[in-house]
Image (spheres, helix red, strand yellow):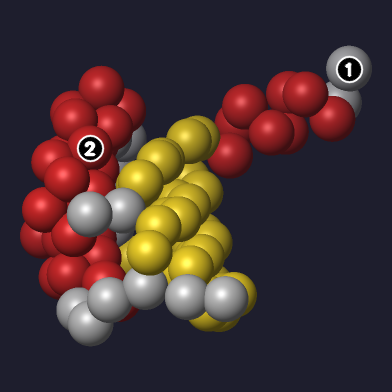
Amino acid sequence: MKAIITVVGKDSKGIVAGLSTKIAELGLNIDDISQTVLDDYFTMMAIVSSEEKKDFTYLRNECDKLGDSLQVKVNIQSTAIFDAMYNL
């Protein structure tokens, strides 16, 4: 299972720490990550994976809760969606 996590919001301390801790708790591995701060706004994209199949409804709910606690928008999508869009 592979997924893309995106994070956008006002920059503050602890965003990367909070996100990486939650990713580990969810049993996911960070395969690649890129982040930047643009004019006080934090943006990040991470490719995550797991050897096990994951429930995306559960993962989305957990990302929503994490985003609320960090005051950013956290989104997770299966890479299969992107693969299907570009293979049409």
Residue at position x 58%, y 39% from top? 79
Quadrant showing the N terminus: top left
Q: Looking at numbered disc 1 in the image, what kind of residue is underneath it?
A: Leu
Residue 35, x across and y down, in percent: 53, 76
Of the numbered discs in the image, which one, if any, rests on residue 64? 2
Q: Secondary structure at mark 2?
A: helix
Q: Which residue is mark 1?
A: 88
Residue 24, x across and y down, in percent: 18, 66
Q: Is residue 11 above or below residue 22?
A: below
Q: Is residue 29 visible?
A: yes
**Mark 2, other Cα within 10 Å: few <14 / some 14–19 / many ≥20:** some
| CA–CA distance in space, label 2 to label 1 | 30 Å
Q: Nearer the viewer, residue 87 or 72?
A: 72
Residue at position x 77%, y 24% from top? 85
Residue 58, x across and y down, in percent: 18, 28
Considering every residue shown, the one lying at the far top of the view is 88
Specify whether 32 is left or right of 50.
Answer: right
Task: Specify the quadrant of the image occupied by residue 65.
Answer: top left
Residue at position x 86%, y 26% from top? 87
Considering every residue shown, the one lying at the far right of the view is 88
Which callout, 2 or 1, points to the residue nearer the camera? 2
**Mark 1, other Cα within 10 Å: few <14 / some 14–19 / many ≥20:** few
